[in-house]
Amino acid sequence: MRVAVVGATGAVGAVMRRLLAARAFPADEVVYFASERSAGRELDGRVVQPLRDDTIQGFDLALLSAGGGTSREWAPRFAAAGALVVDNSSAWRMDPDVPLVVSEVNPEAIDEAGKGIVANPNCTTMVVMLPAKALDTAFGLRAMVCTSFQAAGGAGQKGIDELANQVAPLAADVQQLVDDGATAARKVEHAVHANTLAFNVVPLLGKLDGNGYTDEEMKLQNESRKILALPGLEVTPTCVRVPVMVGHSIAVRATFDREPDLGEALEALRAFPNLVVDEAPTPLEWAGRDETVVGRVRRDLSDPRVLNFFVVGDNLLKGAALNTVQLGELAIERGLVGTPA
């Protein structure tokens, strides 16, 4: 089996490369692809290839994490050349002919990849889906109010670098952060995040739509409905960028058809694959870990059909690279590529 990794030099691509090795992915050959400026460099003893019609032939599986523009152009070309494509960008997620799959939540959907393309969800949506599915199965999910606390790493390496570069100049004058925050914020530049992120939170993440919500917030609504097969699911999203390097957190207020029993809810969460229950999880402590973790699970103070919880996941791992590799493993397991295990 030949596997292509497109975007191999990026933040998510680097994690994918590590996971393919660590999980002993059953590939006979793995070939790295990147932009023209990165082509020719050596990574892990392999020469990075450019994307050309002659270089993409003969692959069984293509794992793409190179941005929407690249995916829109090259995913169909890889598929036409015979590969099953697992795409990590937003390009194909809402295409009705492309399944949007979380490996533990809706694995059977991968069988419907009529275009030869499978989409990976947005990293924030991904984190919510595991507990949402567990509780939907138990009680019937009707609505979610989701407030995200998204890491700088959600914008890739450049997002991490921008936050890191802002910390020292602002930390040099702590009193200014107390007395004149506006002046402190202007001491550093920001291009990746909507405002200065160090020692701050930024409640604008993505491009504003005409309805007052951002495209990042609408992904939470639209992708949740598709993954959970709940087209009428009510989702009220607010996406916030916080000064965390890696790890998205979401506070969720979930409403159900059936009044949830707290003990039954915790049992359902603990039993769900790759989901851990912890009292008060933080993104720092769960950075670099494969599992998604949920905590602060409690009944609502006013509505008996509501549960509130806080969920955390590494946006570079389960939020991106890990699910991509898991979908490759799932495709092999279900006989879509290679020989079934």
Image (cartoon, rainbow, N blue to C red):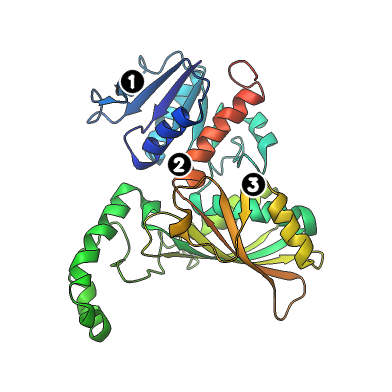
Going by the picture, which residue comes out furthest to the right?
258
Q: Residue at x 77, y 64 (%)?
A: 263
Nearer-N-terminus badge (2/1) = 1
Three-letter amino acid code at the position of disc 3: Ile
91 or 253: which is nearer to us? 253
Q: Is residue 128 visible?
A: yes
Count residues near mark 3 (Cα–Cα under 10 Å), then give few for <14, some for 14-19, many for 20+. Answer: many
* Residue 273: mark: none
Give the amino acid at mark 1: Arg
What secondary structure is found at the residue carrying circle 1?
Answer: loop
Residue 334 place in picture, x, y as percent: 67, 25
Residue carrying label 3: 227
Looking at the rendered structure, the kind of residue marked 2 is Ser
Q: Give residue 89's mark.
A: 2
Q: Which image quarter is the C terminus in?
A: top right
Determine the CA span between mark 2 and mark 1.
20 Å
Q: Secondary structure at mark 2?
A: loop
Q: Position of residue 35 (x, y in %)?
A: 29, 31
Label at residue 52: 1
